Image: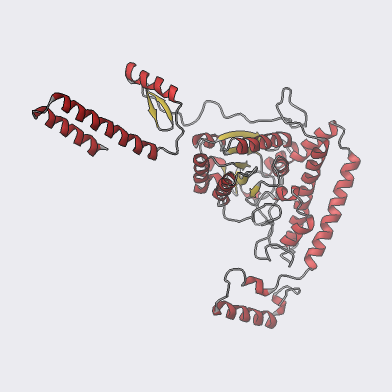
């Protein structure tokens, strides 16, 4: 563009010193200016194709003010930018923190003037049932790991509302990209307690063929992408899936879950920008539970949590009380409608607290006070809070509570007993599903492994399948 301008200026200079007809000279100059404007317009339209164009009438008004008011504003790519005569830096933090949407107080009482979506008795009771089931499953499978019956486990204690209430606000066609603390979403969608146990015990009915760590679930039937331990890699994947849903004009969105630690990864930032630019129907749900394993949020970022990062990337965002099932249900269902109907990404920051250890490999009392954990467990338990609300509505009572917990415990103990006694996947599954025709070196490894198992059977599970 600078070369084109230089050429025009050079021609203008020559024309002023050449004895051409004045009218002809003016016509040549006018043609050159028109051609330059056409080229600049074409280049500009290509370079700025991804930005939102201003309304013509608004643009004309700005052009007038730009010319007549001593350059008060500029129609810059992405919108109008006003000029100011004073040097003003944007503050590193707002004067007040972003507010947190809440419907139920800590005692399960509706807050006066609350704006929320009505929940039927059937849905509310199922939400509570699944929160209790998730809580019970965590307790029993955690104990199984401590007994040495499974190798690993990760609990959702304190975050049951985020799991179940968010799932209740979505549709089955929505594709879930979990981190590893969202088994409740899968539970809500119909994944059975037996299927959970099969995966944790890595038996032949495990859909992952025993190749994953326990608690790394996945189900094609339930649109739940298999969990990966690598932090935040699922976030850009969700954006790509959302863009695909948009291209196919599906009445569905992609949903991805991650913790505050995930927001410290580059994948989070790339994904938000990617989603905003492509206007992908994706919901980002951040479980801000205060800790990325042993790293507190104060050592991760200086911003006002995660919610403000959405605005920085042009993503509509909301902060929600993560221990308030009613608020989460309303926020997620509303976000889903926005994402699909308006073709836009939505970021939800759910403030909660990880009451349990990070995993069974962690002892969180080494880096946070035990009385803090106990305070959140007793005073801000999302399950107890929601129970109080459904009891006030006459939808639940102590008899139903006792029967539910007793029944769930029996079901879980039975599921574990069954899963533990089912034989393991065949050894061949370790080497399959990568190559169409396995290379010779893999075949040799398989034979050597089988020989080793036969030679040292006491080192391997008794129910392993050769």
Rendered location of residue 367, percent (x, y): 61, 47
Evaluate whether residue 39 shows in this view.
Answer: yes
| Residue 213 position by quadrant | bottom right
Residue drawn at (43%, 38%) of the image = 49
| Residue 98 position by quadrant | top right
Question: Of 238 and 147, which appears nearest the observer?
Answer: 238
Rendered location of residue 5, percent (x, y): 23, 34
User: Left or right: 390 with respect to 214?
Assistant: right
Quadrant including the N terminus: top left
Residue drawn at (46%, 31%) of the image = 92
Question: Of 365 and 330, which appears nearest the observer?
Answer: 330
Rendered location of residue 301, percent (x, y): 51, 40
Tally of marks: 0
Question: Of 386 and 217, which appears nearest the observer?
Answer: 217
Q: Determine the residue located farthest toward the top in the rendered image.
A: 68
User: Left or right: 196 with respect to 37?
Assistant: right
Question: Of 286 and 16, which appears nearest the observer?
Answer: 16
94 shown above or below 445:
above
Quadrant including the C terminus: bottom right
User: Left or right: 187 with respect to 233?
Assistant: right
Residue drawn at (76%, 51%) of the image = 190
Q: Determine the residue located farthest toward the right in the rendered image.
A: 399
56 shown above or below 141:
above
């Amino acid at each position: 563009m600078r070369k084109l301008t230089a050429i025009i200026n050079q021609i203008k200079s020559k024309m002023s010193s050449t004895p051409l007809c004045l009218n002809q000279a003016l016509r040549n100059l006018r043609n050159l200016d028109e051609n330059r404007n056409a080229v600049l317009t074409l280049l500009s339209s290509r370079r700025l194709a991804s930005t939102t164009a201003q309304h013509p009438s608004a643009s004309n008004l700005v052009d007038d003010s730009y010319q007549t008011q001593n350059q008060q504003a500029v129609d810059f790519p992405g919108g109008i930018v006003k000029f100011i005569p004073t040097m003003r830096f944007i503050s590193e933090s707002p004067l007040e923190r972003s507010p947190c949407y809440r419907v139920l107080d800590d005692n399960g009482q509706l807050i006066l003037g609350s704006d929320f979506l009505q929940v039927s008795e059937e849905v509310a009771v199922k939400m509570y049932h699944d929160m209790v089931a998730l809580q019970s499953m965590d307790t029993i499978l955690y104990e199984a790991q401590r007994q040495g019956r499974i190798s690993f486990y990760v609990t959702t204690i304190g975050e049951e509302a985020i799991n179940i209430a968010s799932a209740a606000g979505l549709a089955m066609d929505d594709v879930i990209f979990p981190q590893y603390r969202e088994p409740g979403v899968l539970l809500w969608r119909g994944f059975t307690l037996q299927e959970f146990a099969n995966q944790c015990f890595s038996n032949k009915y495990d859909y992952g063929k025993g190749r994953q760590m326990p608690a790394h679930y996945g189900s094609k039937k339930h649109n739940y992408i298999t969990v990966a331990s690598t932090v935040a890699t699922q976030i850009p994947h969700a954006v790509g899936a959302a863009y695909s849903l948009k291209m196919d004009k599906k009445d569905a969105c992609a949903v991805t879950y991650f913790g505050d630690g995930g927001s410290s990864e580059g994948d989070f930032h790339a994904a938000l920008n990617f989603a905003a630019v492509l206007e992908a129907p994706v919901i980002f749900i951040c479980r801000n539970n205060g800790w990325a394993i042993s790293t507190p949020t104060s050592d991760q970022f200086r911003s006002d949590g995660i919610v403000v990062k959405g605005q920085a990337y042009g993503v509509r965002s909301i902060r929600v009380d993560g221990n308030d099932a009613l608020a989460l249900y309303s926020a997620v269902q509303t976000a889903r409608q926005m994402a699909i109907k308006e073709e836009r990404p939505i970021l939800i920051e759910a403030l909660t607290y990880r009451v349990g250890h990070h995993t069974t490999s962690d002892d969180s009392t080494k880096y946070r006070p035990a009385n803090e954990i106990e305070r959140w467990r007793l005073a801000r338990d999302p399950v107890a809070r929601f129970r109080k609300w459904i009891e006030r509505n006459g939808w639940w009572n102590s008899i139903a509570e006792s029967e539910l917990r007793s029944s769930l415990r029996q079901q879980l103990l039975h599921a574990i007993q069954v899963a533990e006694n089912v034989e393991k996947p065949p050894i061949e599954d370790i080497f399959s599903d990568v190559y169409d025709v396995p290379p010779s070196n893999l075949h040799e490894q398989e034979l050597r492994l089988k020989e080793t198992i036969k030679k040292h059977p006491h080192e391997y599970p008794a129910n392993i399948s050769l």
